[in-house]
Image: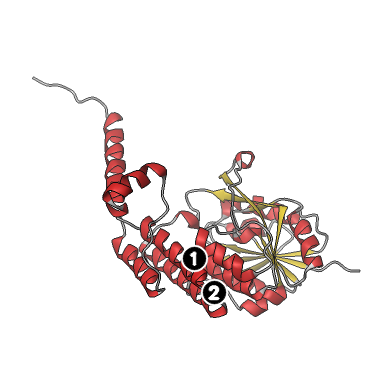
Amino acid sequence: MTEPLVSVVIPCYNARPWLADTLESALAQTWPHTEIVVVDDGSTDGSRDVVKRYPVRLVEQSRRGPSAARNAGVAATRGEVVQFLDADDVLHPDKIARQMERLIEVPTALALGTQGKFPDTERDRAVFPVIATSRDWDDPVDFVTAVLATGDMVATTAWLVPRALVERAGPWARSLSFGEDTEYLCRLALAASRIAFCDRAVVYRRQHPGSLSTLDTPATRRCRLRAVSRCARLLLSRRDTALGRQAAARYFTQLAYAYYPHATVFSRLAERRVAALGVPPMEPLMGSRRRRLARVIGWRAASRVALGLRSLHRLVGRRGHEPPRSRTG
């Protein structure tokens, strides 16, 4: 019996410092039947030169964003299963093989793995956060509900997706430049028969200043709100329950909290999403010290106090590093 072909799709934009490590991890997979396609999304840093040193296929396009690059990669491949791999992440050598064991058992499942985070070049310092959604789920609706309720996102690189699910879910949303992974995960999950988790299928997510996940701009906030709104609509169109509405409201509440007070416009938009769900306002989840303060003055005032203290600490820190002023006279 011939093993199913797994297509590794790598969207790439200005990833030269990390790309070789990513490609070598894809080429080192123990699953014997793979193809690797890199979609260069208009890089200007010489990423294409790195790709050309490896036995992989290169697809080039003008800058269109990560969703369009992933769509182009899927269109350029022919595998029965798709591995999406960000250009700065790394796969454990057995990642695909271990998840394929699960997919061979249940070909209509969406396979998820374990994700670690490491600081740039120090993979031996990887930490593996506890993610509440990292387990088997017999009902994909329950999984999507948990994603919204906890905010625990399973990284794109940790998925392994039968092409049939990709076709049922449709293309990545090109209108979303941020949060598109959450929106697409919800679509894939709701197209699957179940969620199959494999804790031995390990991926490593690189943390560096250029990571998209670290961006907080008006554009990324707007996209995040739109992505979560789409997830909520998808969930409630499949099964409209009080639990589902509360889960979506929890996610929007945490966004309102995260955006306050430095981005009050977006914080208010998130609160309006909660009201539109017909769910009473809920207190955001926060650290113990701020929670104690919030019980006395409210979470918004507590957030303003915290922001003021951070600004004060930065100011004191800068002054502490200033050279002493010379005295004259």
Q: Secondary structure at mark 1?
A: helix
For residue 207, the mark is none
Asked if the residue at tag 1 contacts the one at tag 2, i.e. Cβ–Cβ closer than 8 Å, the answer is: yes
| Rendered location of residue 95, percent (x, y) | 73, 55
Residue 238: which quarter of the image?
A: bottom right
Residue 147, compared with residue 28, is above or below; it is: below
Residue under label 1: 247
Residue 143: which quarter of the image?
A: bottom right
**Which amino acid is tagged 2?**
Leu
24 and 105: which one is in front? 105
Q: Residue at x 31, y 65 (%)?
A: 268
Q: Where is the C terminus found, in terms of image quarters?
A: top left
Q: Residue at x 47, y 49 (%)?
A: 209
- Asked whether, in this view, residue 91 is left or right of residue 257, the answer is right
Q: Residue at x 23, y 24 (%)?
A: 324
Q: Where is the N terminus found, in terms of image quarters?
A: bottom right
- Mark 2 or mark 1: name the one nearer the start of the chain: 2
**Which amino acid is tagged 1?**
Ala
159 and 319: which one is in front? 159
For residue 235, the mark is 2
The residue sitting at the left extreme is 329
Q: Secondary structure at mark 2?
A: helix
| Rendered location of residue 18, percent (x, y) | 60, 51
